[in-house]
Amino acid sequence: MATVQYFVKRLFYIIIVFFFVSIIMFFIYKSVPGDPVRMMLGNNITNPQVYQQQYDSMRESLGLDKSLPIQYISWISKMLTGNFGFSIQYRQDVIRIVAAPLKNTVTLNLFSMFFVFLISIPLGILTGVKHNSVLDNTVQVGTIVGYSLPTFVIALLAIFLFAIVFPLFPISGVNTPGFTGTGMEKALDTLHHMFLPMLVMVLGGVGSVVRYVRAAMIDVLRMDYIRTARAKGLREQVVIYVHAFRNALIPIVTIMTGWLISVFGGSVVIESIFLWNGIGKMMIDALNQRDFSVVLTMQMFYVVLTLAGNVIMDIGYCMVDPRVKLTN
Amino acid sequence: MKKKLLSLFLASAMVISMAACGNNGVTTNNAPENTGADNEEVGDNSQETQEQEGTKPNAPSGQLVIGSTTDLKSDFLPGWSNDAQNQACYLLLFDQGYSTVQYTKEGEFVFNPTVVKSHEETENPDGSKTFTVTIQDGLTYNEGTPITAKDYVFQALLVSSPEMGAVDGFSSDGYIYVYEGYEEYNSGQTKNFKGVRLVDDMTYSVTVKADELPFHYDIYYAGLVPYPISVISPGCTVEDSEDGATITGEFTSDVLQETVNNPQTGYRYRPLVTAGPYQFESYDTTTKQGVLTVNPAFLGDYKGVKPLIEKIILKTVTSATSIDELRAGTVDLLSGVSGGTEINAGLDLVDEGIAQKAVYLRAGYGKIAFDCSVFPVDSVNVRQAISYIIDKDEFVRQYTGGYGKSVYSFYGLSQWEAIENADWIESELNHYDVDVEKAKSLLAEDGWTFNKDGEEYKDGDGTRYKRLEDGTLAPLTINWANTPNNPVSTLLSSVLPDAMTEIGMELNPTTIEFGVLTESIMHRTDVQYHMYNLATGFSSAHSPWYYFSMDDDRMGLYNQNWIKDEDLAKTSWAMKSIPYEDKEGWVEAWKEFIKTWNEKLPDIPLYSDQYHDFFTNKLKGYEPDGLWDWRYAIIDAYIQE
């Protein structure tokens, strides 16, 4: 019963926050200087009357001739029914244009996340167990370098090394230009193109996760119950993976949830350098073009994800630590 | 130790496995590294290829990947996108095909002899002008459907109709509004378009309104492009009456929303029936790459030339890695490369024999644009004084890396008028070479003769002041709006403040985003800036009278300088009425306008780039220039593997 109450309360909280944030976001973006309709029309029309007529007509059809509160009510009521508005940059419904970049971003992020955790959790455990060893120190230095180097520097270095000096991978894009082949061949071609952006994301991501896992492991390994487990004569692997790592999972769950949410958020830098047609690049282009329907849709999507992510995080805590209960 | 080895092995295995699963589909080469730079032909307006051209193939072959820093969007029908890549597709799918009037490499508009059997121009008693055009027999769309005059008339009726105007996102950017009866037809008052007539199956006529004439490029108004009525408006046809042509049948916005705007099948996204030199093959929303292939039914352009490159692929590149893409073979052509760093990297490829180049001058320039409606830059003396303190040649050298030239008036270096009158430009126009004393005397003449205490200004007094009519003293402060991450702003920031201080001028720079800058130019925010960083490009139908008109409704959008100068308006307006055939008269009027502009100086032209196209060695016969860029030049080119 307490759990049900908890979820009802959290749902209510999510709805309130959603509307509050939607109002703030809407008015902030609408107050950004710049006229989206002028950007949309360009200056190819040489007759001022015809231009003005098209300008007025476009403003009216986009609802920009209304007051801001009316625009907000129209926007939010449409959004709640699945109509996310019209992109002035692409001149299409937003729902149509975000699908492909979102898919590209999610694919890249899922692959990156898989390899980040595949590498960093074992490495974090290892360095936590062997802390202050040569391996630990080496990994610490390596992760600091990976963590602190700007992404664009790593990206350009990766291109230079793996696409120019050793031309193993393409410099940019999602597929080979004009690629024709079966679905499987196309998927492999995409993987080929994905390697370098993924490598950069993994190099940047491993650093922080390794350090998180390592720190959590060091803390847990100092606990009395670890000493007790060892004193009971349990094998070291059992002590580490069953007793220590499970207890070290709580901070890891926090960052994993954050990563899960960020799966839907693209990296502007990586997507721009590698021309990976993703949502990060689309968002920055939309902002520059004052394409607020796109920006607001994605922002609200992230708001929902973040709010839902907090609930998922709480559930995750319960799963890894039976002492944690979902109550009010 | 075992664990260390295991972790190392796992990391290596991941890298190797990813490499192994992705080794198909990319052309690479192991070319040596770039060496040195090459800057021998600064200011040369020439096209150059490294290798001897071989024999042209008899049939289209090969493919060309064209890289652009602009994304290609999913729009292939004019009216939805102003982006460069989409505009290129419009040309290749429509305008460069069976348009009745075409732009030539020589810089002229001509009736396209491949398409036009005969044409007639009639000047009507009311001052309007009717162009009657008969098209050739045997023209077809790419899938074999015959093209008749109905298809041409349909295009004019479609793009100006209220039904099309109601289709989501469509905006007509053509010149159909110059035809008689446009307003009535466009507003839905009439179903017939008075100025557009279907004379017979192979003949159409258009009547240009009297108040749009005389117009130097009036031949341009005679041109229409065929749109397939059976695809865009199935079941409809074009009929003619004394009131003009009309579309009959179920011609509604709902139908167009489906036939044009359906995301899966709409003509806007998949124009499968076209009459350009190329036809639509595919567009991938995941990669934003588009593929065009040769139109097998295309009879040729205005010269009768058919394209010989079978497939064109449009791909996005970044300026940071575009030359590397050319080296790697993932891109075959980079057009309009500018800036020393990129050009030098491209020239290295040329030196290494990996690529070829074509060099031409830009039809436009980078500039400081004044808002001439604002004190103190409403004074020509102040504008000239600023020009006299900027070393334009040095600016060109530094900004373009030596790959550029100075411009002295409102012209592009690749315009035929500028090419033919290069000597006159050199001798007759004021170059505004650096002359601090001249700048000071101009300011003194303009009344900037006081210091802040109202005493006579002497060198070293700081900012100059001018006594206004109401007796107050106004400082000589220039508010300069520039955009972020802009090398022109950076360079000017290092030059202007000291130079201005020397002549008693104070610079007040502000960095604002381009969208904000645009709003400011349009005077949609408080008018607070005196000058901006901008660039300008000239079109093939160069029409300066729009940009220096004194009409209030042209201010901002067209007359970005907000300059109301009678001499400038008069000299530019005089060009508008010169008949298209009267080249001599046009050049004389052009000279007068250029000279006037050079004196009034609404902008300070800072640099005009020397553009470089870098392209693969397999591309032959490719000869672009400033107004004949790759979109046109590609028709004459071919691939030799």
Image (cartoon, rainbow, N blue to C red):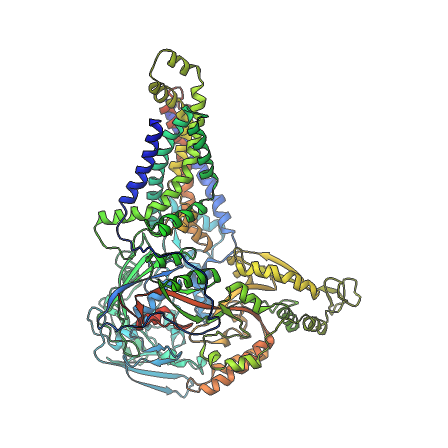
Q: Residue at x 60, y 62 (%)?
A: B527
Residue situated in front as seen by the camera: B184 or A102? A102
Left of A53 or right of it: where is B261? left
Give the answer, above or below, for where B578 lies relative to B326.
below
Q: Quadrant of residue A178?
A: bottom left
Residue B290 in the image, given as x and y percentages of width and height: 30, 59
Indicate whether B251 appears above or below B201. above
Location of residue B51 in the rendering, given as x and y in whole percent from the top left corner? 33, 70
Which quarter of the figure has residue A289?
Answer: bottom left
The one nearer the camera, A116 or A129, is: A129
Q: Position of residue A209 (x, y in %)?
A: 42, 33
What percent of the width, then of the height, locates residue B235?
A: 22, 67
**Quarter of the image where the C terminus of chain B is located:** bottom left
Residue B477: tell me if it is visible.
no
Considering only vertical position in the picture, is B281 above or below B435?
A: above
Q: Quadrant of the N terminus of chain B?
A: top left
Frontmost residue, A184 versus A150: A150
**Marker count (numbered):** 0
Look at 38% across and 54% down and name the residue there: A86
User: In the current view of this chain or complex, which residue is farthest to the top?
Assistant: A232
Against B297, is A301 above or below?
Answer: above
Please say whether residue B388 is visible from this viewpoint.
yes
